[in-house]
Amino acid sequence: MPISNEERGALASPISTPRQSPRAKLPFELGLRTSRPPDTFSNPLDYRNARHTSTQNFSFTPRDSNSTRPPTECEEVSDQEWELRTGRAIFVLQETLPTFFQTGLTTSIDTLTGKPKQPNYSQHSHFHIPIIDNAAAASLEFLSSGATTSSSVPKGKNGNGNGKSKHPQTAEDDADEENIYSPNIRLQYTPPVALPAPFPKTFKLEGINLYLASSSIVRHSMNALFHDLSVTLVKVSVHNEPPPPSDGSASSSQSSPPPSGPRDPSKRSPRKLNREKYLLVRQLVNGINRVSGKEAEWEVESMYTFSPLSGLIMKHTVNSIRPAPHLAVYDLLKGSLGQVFGFGEPAGRKPGVCASAVGVGEDGTGDGDVRRK
C-alpha cells in the first residue's frame, strides 16, 4: 500500500520520549535529606540544590581544592627553616613552661623579636572546638576565659601548618607570629598501674584543639585545688634519637615513636639523621593544697618529638608523673573532657561535683595531679 506524504513525514520526524527527570541523574542523593523542609523553598530548584549540597558532607561531591581545610604536615621545609623552628620551639618551652599555671600554654613565637608570644586572652572570649565523633557533624562553643582560640592555629600562608593568627583586628600584629605545635599534635600518657574499666591503658589525644583544651582544663583544675603553683625545670636535653625514659616509667614501651629506619647512623643518610630531634624535659611542680594547707610536689618527665617535615612539635609523650595521679583525678579529667567534647559523663558522677569531693587527699601526694598527646 503506497504511503502518503503526510505519513512519510511523520515517520521521518524523531520520536518524542518522556524527558528524564533531573533527579534520576543523582542516584547518590537517594535517602539524603536537607535539614529544611520542602515547603520552605519558594523555588523547587532551590530545594534540589540544597539536597545536592548536603551530599558534600558525605564526600559524594569532590570538594573544592581551594576550600578551607586543616593544615597538614605534607609539605617539607628547608633544612635551615627546620633548624630555626625546632630551636624556636625549644626556646619557647624553656621560657614559658615555668609560668604555665599563671599565663597558660604559649604556642607561638614572634619571629621579629624572637620572644615567645603570650596568649592574648582579652581578645578571645571563647574558642570553637569540633566534637570528635564520626557520627556527629555538629560543633559546640567551649567557654573559657583563659583558653587559646582555635583560630590562632589555622593554616599558615606557606601551607605547611605553621598556623598564623588570622584575627582581622590583629592581622598586622600577628603577621610575624609562628606556632611551635603541629595542628595534628598527639598527647599520650600511660599510667604506671593499669586503671580499671572504662579507663584505657594509655590516654591519647590528637589534634591541636584537644591539646589546647586539655592544657586549659589541667591549668584551671590545678589552680582550683592548689595555690602558689610553680614549675621548675630540672632537666632539658636535646637528642637525635628517642631518649630512654627514666627508670620505673610505665610509658617506657610507648614513649618512643615507631622506628623510621635503621638506628645505625652508618646505614642512614645524614639528612635523615639531622631531621630527627627529641626534647626531654623534667620538671618539678609545687603547690599548696587549698584545703589542708600542706605543700605537694610532683616530678613530671615529658618527651617532645619534632616533625621531620615541618619542624613543629608533633608529639608530646608524658613519660612519668611521680607520685602517680589518683584515680579520682582521671575521673575528674574524663568528666571535664566529656562535658566539652560529648564523651559522656562517668558512671556514678553528677555534673558539678566539687573537685575536693572526689579524692583530693590532704597530704597532696598524687591526688591533685593532672596530666596525661
Image (tube, rainbow, N blue to C red):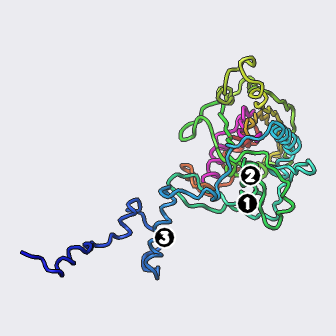
> Which secondary structure lies at badge 3?
helix
Q: Which residue is situated farthest in the left direction here?
A: 1
Query: Image quadrant of residue 11?
Result: bottom left
Q: Residues within 10 Å of mark 1 (few under 14, many from 20)?
A: some
Where is residue 351 drawn, in percent x and y? 61, 57
| Comparing labels 2 and 3, the label whose residue is closer to the camera | 3
Q: Quadrant of the C terminus?
A: top right
What segment carries the magenta color? 310-338
Q: CA distance from mark 2 to mark 1?
A: 8 Å
> Which secondary structure lies at badge 2?
helix
Residue type pointed to by label 2: Ser
Residue situated in front as seen by the camera: 116 or 78: 78
Contact (CB < 8 A) between labels 2 and 1? yes
Residue situated in front as seen by the camera: 41 or 332: 41
Q: Residues within 10 Å of mark 2 (few under 14, many from 20)?
A: many
Question: Which callout, 1 or 3, points at the residue further toward the start of the chain?
Answer: 3
Residue situated in front as seen by the camera: 124 or 230: 124
Q: Quadrant of the N terminus?
A: bottom left
Residue type pointed to by label 1: Ser
Give the labeled residue for mark 3. 50
Q: Quick check: 274 left or right of 74?
A: right
Q: At 74% across and 53% down in the image, what residue appears?
A: 153
Q: CA distance from mark 2 to mark 3?
A: 39 Å
Give the labeled residue for mark 2. 216
